[in-house]
Image (cartoon, helix red, strand yellow):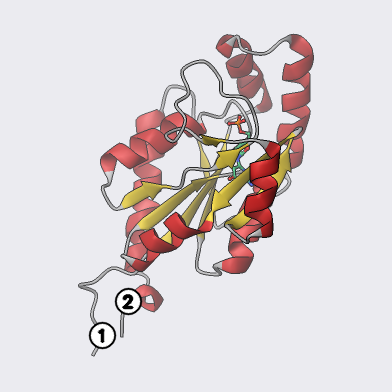
């Protein structure tokens, strides 16, 4: 007997070049849907002003990070710039097993690893409307100097090369965050309707 009454959980990966607005979009998604639970990554990078340990990231040392890698505690991990980032396995598995959506805001390398582990994961790439717009946003953010902005823009070109590996591409138009969130909500709704996600 087919039953759609009990939703089957899945991973929702959200990747985007720096400056595209993924943090804001992820936050709005979390607030709009109680089934979406954010996976909190562990990182060796220093916390930025306003970031809260255990909420934005779990900040840790290189040696604790290595221990966690050796113990197989990460679903995936990657070196981004000169720091390490990893997705702790247990919370993701718990969320999926209880029928929720585990939201992973991770880079393109992580997205590929998650796809290999969970072939039914949904990968959403948040795309800036144009490179000019991305440059404007990075400048307006005021957190990086000119050379860092150049580096981020060239990295964005590389990351955009992974778009074809993603399930969906959503353009985050300037000042249209609500529309972007609505599009991702529609993706979630459609994914729930996939018959191969229904419990049999
Ligand atoms: P930031 O230091 O700006 O917060 O993040 C830098 C990059 O690392 C972003 O692309 C972010 O999505 C990515 N990232 C954050 N957490 C993880 C993770 O657990 N795994 C991977 N592979 N990338 C991550």
Label 1 Cα crowd, 10 Å radius (few <14 / some 14-19 / many 20+): few
Could you tell whether 28 is left or right of 117 in the image?
Answer: left
Q: Is residue 72 above or below residue 23?
A: below
Instruction: Report the Cα–Cα distance between label 2 and label 1.
Output: 7 Å
Question: Sequence order check: which comes first, mark 2 or mark 1?
Answer: 1
Q: Is residue 68 above or below residue 153?
A: below
* Nearer to the camera, 199 or 75: 75
Residue 47 x/y as whole percent: 56, 24
Q: Is residue 132 above or below residue 121?
A: above
**Which residue occupies 57% across, 30% down?**
129
Residue 65 x/y as whole percent: 65, 45
Helix, strand, or loop for circle 2? loop
Could you tell whether 149 is left or right of 23 in the image?
Answer: right
Residue 99 x/y as whole percent: 31, 65
Could you tell whether 102 is left or right of 115 in the image?
Answer: left
Q: Is mark 2 within 8 Å of ligand 1?
A: no
**Which residue occupies 60% across, 63% down?**
115
Q: Which mark is residue 2?
A: 1
Which of the four quarters of the rendered structure image does ligand 1 lie in?
Answer: top right
* Nearer to the camera, 183 or 107: 107
**Which residue occupies 75% across, 18% down?**
148
Q: Which residue is mark 2?
A: 198
**Which residue occupies 31% across, 80% down?**
199
Helix, strand, or loop for circle 1? loop
Contact (Cβ within 8 Å) of mark 2 with mark 1: yes
* Nearer to the camera, 63 or 160: 63
């Amino acid at each position: 007997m087919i039953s759609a009454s009990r939703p089957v959980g899945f991973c929702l990966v959200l990747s985007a070049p720096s400056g595209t607005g993924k943090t804001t979009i992820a936050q709005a998604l979390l607030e709009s849907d109680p089934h979406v639970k954010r996976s909190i990554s562990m990182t060796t990078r220093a916390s930025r002003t306003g970031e809260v340990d255990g909420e934005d990231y779990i900040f840790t040392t290189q040696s604790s990070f290595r221990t966690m890698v050796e113990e197989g505690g990460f679903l995936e991990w990657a070196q981004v710039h000169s720091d390490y980032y990893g997705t702790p396995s247990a919370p993701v598995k718990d969320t999926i097993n209880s029928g929720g959506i585990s939201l992973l805001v991770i880079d393109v390398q992580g997205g590929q690893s998650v796809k290999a582990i969970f072939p039914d994961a949904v990968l959403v790439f948040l795309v800036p409307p144009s490179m000019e717009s991305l440059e404007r946003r990075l400048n307006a953010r005021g957190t990086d100097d000119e050379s860092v902005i150049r580096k981020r823009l060239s990295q964005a070109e590389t990351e955009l090369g992974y778009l074809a590996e993603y399930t969906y591409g959503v353009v985050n138009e300037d000042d249209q965050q609500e529309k972007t969130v609505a599009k991702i909500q529609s993706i979630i709704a459609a994914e729930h309707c996939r018959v191969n996600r229904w419990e049999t």
